[in-house]
Image: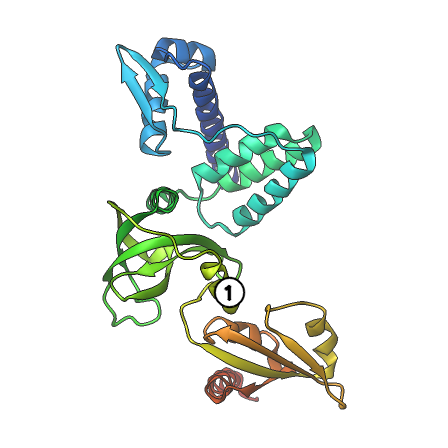
Amino acid sequence: MDRWDSGADAVGRKRDRLARFYRVTTYLEAHPEGATPDQIAAFVGMSRRNAYRDLRALQDELDIPLWADGGRWGISDKAFLPAFRLTRAEAMAVFLAARLMARYADAHDPDLAAAFQKLGEALPPVLGHHVQRTLDVMAARPLDPVGSRNLRLLTQAWAERRIVELTYDPSTYDPARPPRAARVRPYLIEPSAETHALYLIGFDETRGGLRTFKLERIRTLAMTTVQFQPPPDGEIEAALDRAWGIVADQGVVEVVLRFDGSVGSRVAETTWHPTQSLTKNADGSLTWRARVSGTLEIRPWILGWGADVEVLAPETLRGEVAGIVRRAAARYPRG
């Protein structure tokens, strides 16, 4: 057996396991009085031993609240959200949003995969087949049990407005900085298209202000019993409007750029930031302005335009970009 066959077998096993989990939960949902492992095994078409194994996996891996009493197993009434009906267009809209998240994920997320499977059943066969292909791609990725657990725990804390205590590792940007402890009110979990990652945005009681935490850098996480009051309506949305991407806890600065005429029309056809304003100059160049939260996230976007853009303000950002460009040029000496 070659490497490709081995990989395909692993994908098939993950897909079959996910489908089995779905059939087990569906059966238990239909039997609120509970069911024995023998009944579950007969319905799904597996051994009694595998039925026990799947029940344990539903509890331990997917955090589905099951109960067991007198040899019967069931699902807690609070395990699932109420059923809701979607039109074909609505289901497709949800699928496309989830598809974007799945495309950027670098690990297999059982919860996202299960959501895809349920969406696939609500779509026409042609679209449902595409969902199945997406599941195959997702199943080929490695599992990240710690990341999945943290996301589920943060989702619960966010929904129940409960404070979390975490250990965060900032050493990606500064290897000398040790992990730090934080006590955080989870206000929002937000994806970033720029970094292909999820972020927790919340009030850090340890630092006394709004902070952004990349989920991949959370080393330990625990949910407390302490509840918090949510921020005023619109406050978090306003903060995100100031952010270039996901970082909303930096001071607001005005960024002014000049784009060459060769790319000005491409820049002008997209609204890159809610606060942007454009001025077409007599020489054909384009002056672009926006007020953003810090310059950390906008800097890679500026560098992506290469020699077709010049930073006019702020002076600190101009110096940073100039330094990066000079160092890059030094890597390509003539000769």
- Quarter location, residue 99: top right
Residue 41 visible, this orientation: yes
- Quarter location, residue 110: top left
Question: In this image, 279 relative to 24: left or right?
Answer: right
| Image quadrant occupied by the C terminus | bottom right
Q: Where is residue 236 in the image (x, y as percent from the top left)?
A: 45, 60
Question: In this image, 170 relative to 258: left or right?
Answer: left
Q: Where is residue 271 in the image (x, y as percent from the top left)?
A: 65, 67
Q: How many labels does the image show?
A: 1
Q: Position of residue 265 (x, y in %)?
A: 74, 75
Q: Which residue lies furthest to the front in this view?
A: 232
Residue occupying the point 33% across, 43% down: 153
Q: Where is residue 293 in the image (x, y as percent from the top left)?
A: 47, 72
Residue closer to the observer: 60 or 9: 60
Amino acid type of disc 1?
Gly
Q: Residues within 10 Å of mark 1 (few under 14, many from 20)?
A: many
Question: In this image, 82 relative to 91: left or right?
Answer: left
Residue occupying the point 52% across, 40% down: 4
Mark 1 = which residue?
245
> Element at badge 1?
loop
Residue occupying the point 46% across, 11% down: 43
Residue 1 visible, this orientation: no
Up/down of 49 relative to 197, above or below: above
Up/down of 19 relative to 39, above or below: below
How was the colour assigned to the protein in this rendering? rainbow
- Quarter location, residue 69: top left
